[in-house]
């Protein structure tokens, strides 16, 4: 058995050397060179452990499962954001960053083992077919959903645009209904807006996708159109925004700046610094801006808040942000799998690394009851609480009972306070209306 394990060790070491060097023959031909680049003894130990598990573990385990587990463990030991992406995880990442997928256009949840329609998204196949909030989906094509996980049911309903799916639905007060629906490209909106008071706009960015900057530009144009005498000021809500695409955060920051540094990234090598600069045009024509953040504002959200704070363009309000100041690069392995690897830290224009430290608001405002978005609730974990988090690299809450009876302040205390600050900035001439 010892000879068999030794042979297996040699094969695995050769395999791993080939993965690292790219050309097995060249690496193995020069053993002295390879030994200076790779820890051969540790690789042999790994191969011996692999062989021992294959021989003695209580159940048979596939090579694929063992090697994938080893890859996942290797990445997990680095930091909380480096990971291996299998087929489903890689697909979900691409959906999250592009904001597009083939499907029906419904928000769903679980109820008593069935899939419940929370809401059909406007102007999607589900909405056009007549699905309604509260409908219970009993069957997807010929498959009963009872006993399925929510993720399995969602995967069944997603598919190539142009393909058909049949849903059997139970609706209160009605016999079972059948809907034949043609899938389409579904675009997930990351920007929502509304007018709080005449001249005062509100923008909610829930995450940063490839289309977020375009959606934000359109939303600001709509707010201007709603304001008879121009947009006096704007509140940008980044609370519980977990981040997303770096370039999208840069573009959103650029929308409010007229030049200067937005963010820079610095990797391991001295010459790896990348600077991102703002262009000369901005969308608000100098109108005051207040940005709302909290402990759920992370990564790309912190890039935006940090840039606008350091350049003196906005007042940052709320609570300290999450503190994720690292950049992840997605490295495809093949069409279905990829690595998400932390490759750099990012820094605000003043050179401040927010890694495990976060953005400190200019005005700290504790949260009250929040009903603007269902995702703005609960206690928040921060980057500094995560195991293996990267070090920083650098060497007063408001009384919750002291609150206004204003309806907006009751609905969302932080938003109400932000509107009061925004009005003060307008009154004292810190900006002009964006016509």
Image (cartoon, rainbow, N blue to C red):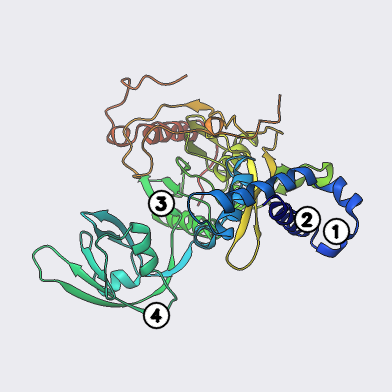
Q: Earlier in the sequence, mark 2 or mark 1?
A: 2
Where is mark 1, residue-wise? 28
Element under disc 2: helix
Q: Earlier in the sequence, mark 4 or mark 1?
A: 1
Does residue 280 appear left or right of residue 400 in this picture? right
Q: Is residue 107 above or below residue 250?
A: below
Crowding at mark 1 (Cα within 10 Å: few <14, some 14-19, many 20+): some
Where is mark 2, residue-wise? 17
Q: Earlier in the sequence, mark 3 or mark 2?
A: 2
Element under disc 1: helix
Q: 221 or 104: which is nearer to us?
A: 104
Where is mark 3, residue-wise? 193
Q: Residue at x 31, y 20 (%)?
A: 401
What is the total number of numbered labels drawn onto the structure image? 4
Pinpoint residue 37: horizontal percent, then vertical percent: 84, 48
Pinpoint residue 240: horizontal percent, then vertical percent: 45, 41
The dot on residue 163 is 4
Is the residue under label 1 in contact with that under label 4 (CB below 8 Å)?
no
Crowding at mark 4 (Cα within 10 Å: few <14, some 14-19, many 20+): few
Pinpoint residue 295: horizontal percent, then vertical percent: 48, 34
């Amino acid at each position: 058995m010892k000879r068999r394990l030794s042979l297996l060790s040699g094969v695995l070491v050769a395999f791993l050397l080939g993965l690292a060097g790219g050309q097995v023959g060249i690496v193995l031909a020069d053993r002295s060179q390879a030994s200076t680049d790779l820890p051969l003894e540790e690789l042999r130990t790994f191969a011996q452990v692999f062989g021992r598990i294959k021989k003695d573990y209580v159940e048979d385990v596939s090579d694929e499962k063992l090697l994938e587990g080893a890859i996942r463990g290797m990445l997990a030991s680095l930091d909380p954001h480096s990971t291996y992406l299998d087929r489903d995880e890689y697909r979900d990442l691409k959906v999250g960053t592009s904001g597009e997928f083939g499907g029906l256009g419904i928000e769903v949840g679980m109820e008593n083992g069935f899939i419940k329609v929370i809401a059909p998204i406007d102007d999607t196949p589900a909405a056009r077919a007549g699905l309604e909030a509260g409908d219970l989906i009993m069957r997807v094509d010929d498959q009963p959903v009872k006993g399925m996980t929510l993720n399995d049911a969602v995967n069944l309903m997603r598919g190539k645009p142009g393909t058909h799916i049949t849903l059997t639905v139970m609706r209160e007060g009605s016999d079972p209904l059948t809907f034949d629906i043609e899938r389409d490209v579904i675009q997930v909106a990351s920007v929502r807006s509304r007018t709080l008071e005449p001249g005062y706009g509100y923008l909610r960015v829930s995450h940063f996708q490839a289309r977020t900057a375009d959606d934000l530009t359109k939303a600001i144009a709509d707010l201007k159109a709603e304001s008879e005498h121009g947009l006096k000021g704007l509140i940008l809500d980044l609370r519980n925004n977990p981040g997303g695409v770096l370039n999208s955060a840069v573009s959103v920051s650029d929308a409010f700046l007229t030049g200067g540094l937005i963010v820079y990234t610095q990797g391991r090598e001295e010459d790896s610094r990348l600077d991102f600069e703002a262009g000369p045009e901005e969308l608000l024509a100098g109108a005051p801006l207040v940005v709302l953040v909290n402990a759920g504002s992370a990564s790309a959200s912190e890039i935006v808040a940090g840039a606008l704070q350091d350049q003196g363009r906005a007042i940052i309000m709320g609570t300290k942000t999450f503190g994720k100041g690292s950049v992840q690069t997605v490295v495809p392995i093949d069409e279905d799998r990829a690595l998400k690897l932390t490759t750099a830290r990012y820094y605000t224009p003043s050179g401040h690394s927010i890694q495990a430290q976060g953005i400190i608001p200019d005005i700290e405002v504790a949260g009250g009851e929040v009903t603007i978005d269902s995702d703005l609730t609960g206690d928040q974990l921060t980057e500094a609480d995560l195991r293996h988090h990267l070090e920083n690299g650098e060497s007063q809450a408001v009384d919750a009972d002291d609150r206004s009876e204003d309806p907006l302040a009751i609905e969302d205390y932080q938003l109400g306070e932000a509107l009061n600050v925004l009005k003060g900035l307008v009154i004292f001439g810190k900006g002009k209306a964006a016509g």
